[in-house]
Amino acid sequence: MPRRVLRSDAPGIMLVTGARGFIGRRLCGRLLADGHSVIALTRDAQHARDVFGSMVRVPKPLSPPKPG
């Protein structure tokens, strides 16, 4: 039985956890460059807004940021 590969080149909404980290920042940038909408989950929502500006949607954090 042949395998079906589901693929869409249409832009979508992507959820990125750890969006402020080494890989997450680059992933968000690439997804935005490819035309996707990005939602960034991170512990420090304000810092994520400072990093990404209005290009990325940043919901309120699930827990307060850890000091330090």
Image (cartoon, helix red, strand yellow):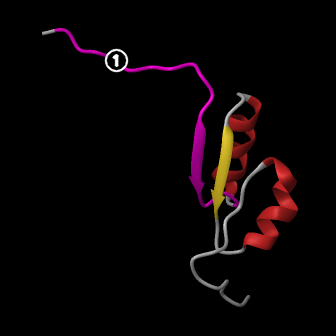
| In the image: residue 55, left or right of residue 9 | right
Q: Is residue 42 above or below residue 66?
A: above
Outermost residue toward the bottom?
A: 67
- Please, what is the dominant secondary structure of the magenta stretch? loop
Residue 41, given in percent of the width and then of the height, sits at 62, 62
| In the image: residue 46, left or right of residue 7 | right
Residue 19, given in percent of the width and then of the height, sits at 66, 57
* Residue labelled with disc 1: 5
Most foreground residue, 30 or 12: 12
- Write the residue at 34% across / 17% down: 5
Look at the numbered disc 1 and give the secondary structure of its residue.
loop
Q: Is residue 56 above or below residue 65?
A: above
The C terminus appears in which quarter of the rendering? bottom right
Count the marks: 1
At label 1, counting other C-alpha atoms closer than 10 Å, the crowd grade (few under 14, some 14-19, many 20 or more) is: few
Tell me the amino acid under the disc marked 1.
Val
Q: Which residues are magenta?
A: 2-20
Residue 24, given in percent of the width and then of the height, sits at 65, 52
Q: Is 19 one of the magenta-colored residues?
A: yes
Q: Is 64 one of the magenta-colored residues?
A: no
Most foreground residue, 57 or 3: 57
The N terminus appears in which quarter of the rendering? top left
Outermost residue toward the left?
A: 1
